[in-house]
Image (cartoon, rainbow, N blue to C red):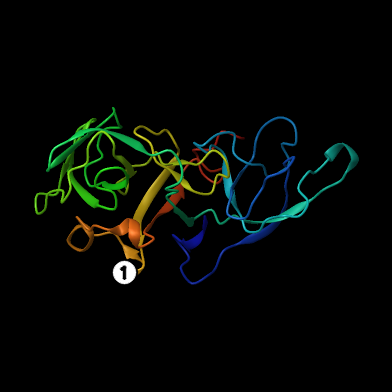
């Protein structure tokens, strides 16, 4: 995850502060940083979970030393990007757990119970039958995702298929991966306090740009092109706004 732009002041870059950090080990550049009540609460720390409450900013480097010991006054610092209005771009990690397909027709795919209001999302077949296809969802219930009516699946996914669910913008509830807290985790239902503002695609044959149905619906063979998906993220439960729970 990295800084992408600011919502308010477009002419400036990111605000970067040397901040006291704490972890026994494992902090990496691009990781979300939070404030947590309790031990070492004066330090920036990794989130307490993938929902990322009490967000402060993003670690801009992988620090050599990070095990601050406040009891001895031994402080270690890391460069943290912390604009209150910052938008960060993060990648959907296709190596994480994806979503199992229950069944599918040529025009609709059934998943396990998902969040509601996912119309306008995308399904990318990450493995199994139909791998490498990308579909725009024109209509969705909590289980059935009906494709944009202009094109059906070229190869219909089945119960051997797994998909990446790329959530529609303004839907909210993005979760980060719970290992490094720097990539987007795909799941049927999420509770993260993170709002996606734009989705992007990039591959060997597709230049980086916003995902649009008339350009990208029913693209196929993307698994052979090193396809990558990203979203612009706004952390609305940060310490900088009223969603915070740290104060």
Q: Position of residue 20 (x, y in %)?
A: 74, 49
As drawn, the residue found furthest toward the top would be 113
Q: Name the residue: 44% across, 53% down.
A: 91
- Along the line of sight, the residue nearer the viewer: 104 or 79: 104
Q: Point out the residue furthest to the left here.
A: 150
- Residue at 46% across / 42% down in the picture? 96
Q: How many numbered discs, if any?
A: 1
**226 relative to 26, above or below:** below
Question: Foreground residue, 220 or 139?
Answer: 220
Q: Which residue is mark 1?
A: 205
For the point 53% across and 43% down, which residue is it? 238
Secondary structure beneath disc 1?
loop
Which image quarter: residue 71?
top right
Quadrant of the drawing holding the C terminus: top right
Residue at the right extreme?
72
What is the x, y in percent for residue 160? 28, 36
Q: Residue at x 43, y 38 (%)?
A: 97
Horizontal and vertical percent for residue 133? 25, 52
Q: Residues within 10 Å of mark 1 (few under 14, many from 20)?
A: few
On screen, residue 52 above or below 232: above
Taking 12 as reference, is 85 above or below it?
A: above
On the rendered structure, is 231 left or right of 60?
left
Seen in the picture, residue 3 relative to 127 is either above or below; the reply is: below
In this rendered view, identify the residue nearer to me: 220 or 55: 220
């Amino acid at each position: 995850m990295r800084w992408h732009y600011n919502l308010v002041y477009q002419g400036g870059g990111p605000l970067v502060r040397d901040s006291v950090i704490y972890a026994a080990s494992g902090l990496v550049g691009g990781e979300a940083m939070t404030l947590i009540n309790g031990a070492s609460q004066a330090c920036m720390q990794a989130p307490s979970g993938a929902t990322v409450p009490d967000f402060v900013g993003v670690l801009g480097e992988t620090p050599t030393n990070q095990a601050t010991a406040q009891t001895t006054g031994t402080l270690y610092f890391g460069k943290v990007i912390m604009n209150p209005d910052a938008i960060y771009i993060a990648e959907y990690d296709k190596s994480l757990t994806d979503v199992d397909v229950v069944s599918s027709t040529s025009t609709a795919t059934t998943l396990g119970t998902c969040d509601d209001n996912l119309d306008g999302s995308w399904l990318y077949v990450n493995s199994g039958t139909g791998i490498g296809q990308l579909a725009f969802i024109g209509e969705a219930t909590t289980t059935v995702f009906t494709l944009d009516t202009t094109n059906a699946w070229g190869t219909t996914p089945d119960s051997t298929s797994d998909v990446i669910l790329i959530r529609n913008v303004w839907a909210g509830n993005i979760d980060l991966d719970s290992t490094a807290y720097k990539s987007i985790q795909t799941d049927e239902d999420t509770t993260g306090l993170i709002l996606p503002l734009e989705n992007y695609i990039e591959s060997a044959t597709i230049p980086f740009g916003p995902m649009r149905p008339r350009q990208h619906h029913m693209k196929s063979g993307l698994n052979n092109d090193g396809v990558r998906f990203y979203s612009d993220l706004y952390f609305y439960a940060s310490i900088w706004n009223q969603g915070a729970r740290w104060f």
